[in-house]
Image (cartoon, grey):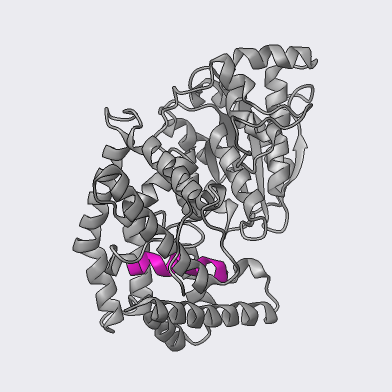
């Protein structure tokens, strides 16, 4: 395939994004995003050289059974969340491929062939296509056996899955096919993927190479694939933004699109986000933004009630059967979201807070909420209790443990409003790929504690 090239406008946009990343101020632990990513990359390289490369080499050489290799990869990535491999396109995809394969010997051969690092782009294309044929057959056999597509491995996960293992073997050649990077390239109009998985990955690789060279020439320093990846991660969603950074000035509030008028355009560019205004405004509402308090009054409601309605809208857009409860209906949570086919229930409460929400302040009331609702809806296999707020204090462990012991809930999730908007955006971008089930959104609710944007982005790849 022909080498990829950028026009002058694409170069300008890419350099602008890179400059914003490189000049970003200190955000956490007194370090800049660049410094934090340098540490991340050092940890990645250390893990590759001390564990992952040897583990993969033993498997490819036939010295390690498939089941042991799969569980070892899972264990290492859960302990070291450096790539976001535990999401739907990584470990979950891996599990489905192995589970769906009736012939484990064939599955082992196909995986060994696909995971071995290609010598060139032509061989990479061939391996992606061959593995895609195998995965598609697994899915077809799964469905023909009377089961739903939910449990079948999705071919669209293949570029991320294979490139993760390829970069372990040669990180200077093969970049990881992150969903965030693909979406940012699309938003910047630098590249648009097709439906050809092999062609898309190789073009993605070439875009990384072109950008690494462009950045190196512009900023007079080397850029690796990891460096380019970090720039896109920063552009797509800054994972280092501190909770204290909130829209308090008039400009930030006025930048929120209005649902009652024409769509606003910031500067001279078209909007990039898939998130509609009613969802985009959730983080500012959660922070108890004063101008939104006044706006709610002029609309004949309170900010708290409007926040609840918007959260309900978010769960509706995700595909749940929703119902607002809350005010005027006794001691009940603010709302619920049902996933009938997947057999689970979400009970949720919205908490508007100018400062972090502390779970311990409402423990008794919350337990009453859960007990009342779970009695009525005990037909569901899993019940998740979700609190949506601006951010959370870190003194929640004892409260969560007590709730799980004393009620019917499976997990208690402290969901930051910004993370909820990120889930909605991911769903609207790829509605057929991100399901509500155990291979999709449900996984985000299977671990108690804070669910923030960084965790969502890592999960989604």
Residue at image position (59%, 39%) is 420
Q: Is residue 192 magenta?
A: no
Residue 332 seen in the figure: no
In which quarter of the view is residue 168 placed? Answer: bottom left
**Residue 6: x percent and y percent?**
46, 56
Apparent side of residue 205 relative to residue 349 in the rendered image (left or right): left
**Residue 173: x percent and y percent?**
31, 66
What is the number of callouts on the image? 0
Q: Is residue 161 magenta?
A: yes
**Residue at the front extreme?**
8
Residue at image position (78%, 25%) is 329
Q: Main secondary structure of the magenta part?
A: helix
Residue 375 seen in the figure: yes
Q: In the depicted view, which residue is nearer to us: 143 or 165? A: 165
Apparent side of residue 198 relative to residue 434 in the rendered image (left or right): left
**Residue 378: x percent and y percent?**
70, 48
Is 353 above or below relative to 9? above
Residue at image position (59%, 51%) is 441
In which quarter of the view is residue 417 placed? Answer: top right
Residue at image position (71%, 59%) is 341
Is 158 above or below relative to 61? above
Q: In the depicted view, which residue is nearer to us: 303 or 203? A: 203
Is 56 above or below relative to 357? below
Apparent side of residue 15 relative to residue 310 in the rendered image (left or right): left
**Residue 283: x percent and y percent?**
58, 28
- Magenta span of residues: 154-166
Is 368 above or below relative to 192? above
């Amino acid at each position: 395939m022909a080498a990829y090239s950028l026009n002058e406008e694409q170069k300008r946009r890419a350099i602008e994004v890179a400059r914003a990343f490189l000049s970003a101020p200190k955000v956490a632990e007194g370090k800049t995003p660049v410094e934090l990513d340098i540490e991340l990359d050092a940890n990645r390289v250390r893990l590759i050289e001390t564990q992952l490369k040897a583990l993969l080499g033993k498997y490819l050489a036939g010295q390690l059974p498939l089941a042991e290799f799969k569980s070892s990869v899972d264990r290492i990535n859960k302990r070291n969340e450096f790539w976001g491999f535990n999401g739907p396109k990584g470990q979950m995809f891996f599990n489905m491929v192995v589970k769906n394969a009736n012939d484990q010997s064939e599955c082992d051969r196909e995986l060994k062939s696909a995971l071995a690092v290609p010598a060139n782009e032509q061989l990479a294309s061939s391996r992606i296509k061959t593995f895609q044929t195998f995965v598609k057959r697994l899915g077809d056999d799964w469905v023909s056996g009377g089961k739903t597509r939910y449990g079948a491995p999705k071919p669209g996960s293949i570029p991320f899955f294979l490139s993760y293992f390829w970069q372990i073997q040669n990180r200077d050649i093969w970049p990881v096919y992150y969903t965030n990077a693909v979406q940012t390239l699309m938003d910047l109009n630098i590249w648009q993927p097709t439906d050809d998985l092999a062609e898309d990955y190789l073009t993605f690789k070439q875009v990384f190479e072109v950008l690494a060279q462009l950045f190196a020439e512009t900023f007079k320093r080397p850029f690796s694939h990891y460096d380019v990846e970090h720039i896109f991660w920063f552009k797509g969603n800054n994972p280092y933004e501190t909770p204290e950074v909130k829209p308090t000035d008039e400009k930030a509030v006025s930048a929120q699109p209005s649902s009652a008028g024409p769509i606003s355009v910031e500067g001279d560019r078209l909007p990039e986000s898939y998130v509609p205004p009613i969802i985009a405004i959730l983080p500012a509402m959660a922070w108890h933004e004063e101008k939104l308090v006044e706006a709610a009054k002029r609309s004949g409601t309170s900010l708290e009630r409007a926040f609840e309605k918007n959260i309900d809208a978010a769960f509706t857009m995700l595909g749940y059967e929703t119902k607002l409860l809350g005010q005027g209906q006794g001691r009940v949570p603010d709302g619920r979201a049902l996933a009938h086919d997947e057999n689970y229930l979400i009970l949720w409460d919205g908490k508007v807070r100018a400062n972090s929400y502390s779970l311990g302040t409402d423990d008794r009331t919350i337990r009453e909420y859960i007990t009342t609702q779970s009695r009525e809806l005990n037909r569901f296999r899993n019940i998740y209790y979700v609190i949506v707020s601006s951010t959370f204090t870190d003194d929640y462990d004892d409260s969560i443990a007590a709730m799980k012991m004393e009620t019917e809930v499976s997990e208690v999730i402290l969901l930051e409003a910004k993370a909820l908007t990120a889930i909605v955006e991911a769903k609207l971008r790829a509605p057929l790929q991100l399901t509500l089930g155990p291979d999709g959104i449900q996984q985000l609710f299977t671990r108690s504690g804070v669910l923030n944007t960084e965790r969502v982005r890592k999960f989604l790849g």
